[in-house]
Image (tube, helix red, strand yellow):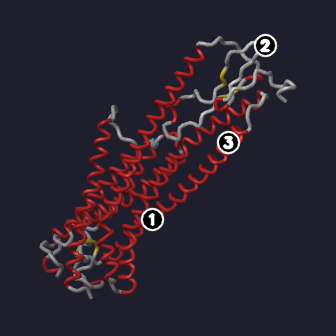
Amino acid sequence: MVSSMQRKVLAILPKCTGGLSLVGSSCIVYDLVQQIRSKPSGSANSFQRIMLGLSCFDMICSFCNVLSTWPSPEDSGTFMAVGNTQTCTAQGFFNELGNLGAVTYSASLSLQYVWQMTSPGLRNRLPPQHEVWLHIVPITLAVIMAVLGLPLTLYNNSGWICWYAPYPKGCQGDECTRGQLAGLFRWIHYAIVWGAIFTVTVSMYLIFRVVRSTEKRANMIRSATSTVRSSGHSGDFMDEAKTSVSVHNSNSTSSSSPRTKRVATQAFLYIGGLYLTWIFTTLTRIFQTAQGVTHLELLILMALFFPMQGCFNALIYFRSQRNRNQHNSRFSATSRAAKTTQFKSSASQAQQPFSVVPPMSVASSCDDGDEDDDDEEFGEELGQPTFHNNTHESREMTLPDGQEGSNELPGNDETE
């Protein structure tokens, strides 16, 4: 039995956590809109559109949690209840609309992450014919489930908020004057919720596999590159060509590795917030249905975490924005330094006589590359052969790491 003090706690706590969620989702929407307006094209990418949809639905259900017990009928015996049947029905409608829309949009977000991980070259650009379904499904399910509750009079006081509930409280079957099918619709609701969570879980597994595969491939190529660098210069032209190709591939793969890890981390954080939001409310409903009892501990955890999805999303979203800004600053500095070094090297080489070198004296100059997802800024200048002041009497070769080779021809007795 819930005491009077416990009822007060359960009525006030969602107002605080729901308020944090409302502020968090509002900040995400504001930031996304500012980003879109700042673009020359004024258009959003797939992540921004999905995140806007998720945050808008979360704002709806967060506002309902802020209202808490206020819209409930005064005769419901709930603390601070000042509403009536109509206000309770309105709160129940928007509560169902926002909650179901937010969780199904979370599934859409995880599918977008899977697409981004498996198609990194597309840069968040889902084909329109695919992306449209990531909006249609969440919106359709949320609207249908919310609208069906109106003619069936399913929205009644359900503790500290109005939702699917029978009225009077504790009635069964024909005893109920409202909400006779509330139990059935609760199970349909949770089936959709955990179907979305299952989709998110499968997406997590697929993302993990992609990250693990990418990291293994990158580590293998880095190891091979280190072996080539430590082995010194080879006089064979085919070995030099293979060195140049393997190092260039290493630059491309290693530059995609940090991007892959950042996307995977972001996906896992969003998904973790989703689990934390829904696990306690689901356990509460399971115990209510199976045992006919309500555990106070689960109710408090439910009132604490269930309204918090928007706050979790905001913390993760702005964390990623901060990391991205720091990463872009580092990349800009590295890019400017690399271009300055390349310009000085080109100017120095332009002052020397140029002659074509026989294949045996071609050497590739290698660079570690920049580990950033915007590696196309560097172009294709890395890993190219360089030719220097050479005649038939002396050939000067440039070795990796800037070491100068002997004036002897590779293959002479002295060098071997």
* Secondary structure of the residue carrying numbered label 3: helix
In the rendered image, residue 212, in percent from the top left (x then y), is placed at 59, 54
115 is higher (above) or lower (below) than 328: below
Q: Nearer the viewer, mark 2 or mark 1?
A: 2
Disc 3 to disc 1, C-alpha distance: 47 Å
In the rendered image, residue 313, in percent from the top left (x then y), is placed at 35, 57
Q: Is residue 316 visible?
A: yes
Q: Is residue 150 visible?
A: no
Residue at the right extreme, as displayed = 413
Report whether 160 appears left or right of 36: left
Depth order, front residue of 135/212: 212
Question: Which label belongs to residue 393?
Answer: 2
346 is higher (above) or lower (below) than 35: above
Question: Which label belongs to residue 224?
Answer: none
Depth order, front residue of 260/288: 260
Report whether 229 appears left or right of 139: right
Quarter of the image with the C terminus is top right
Chain-order first, disc 3 or disc 1? 1
Residue occupying the point 36% across, 75% down: 184
Depth order, front residue of 217/85: 217
249 is higher (above) or lower (below) than 82: above
Disc 2 to disc 1, C-alpha distance: 76 Å
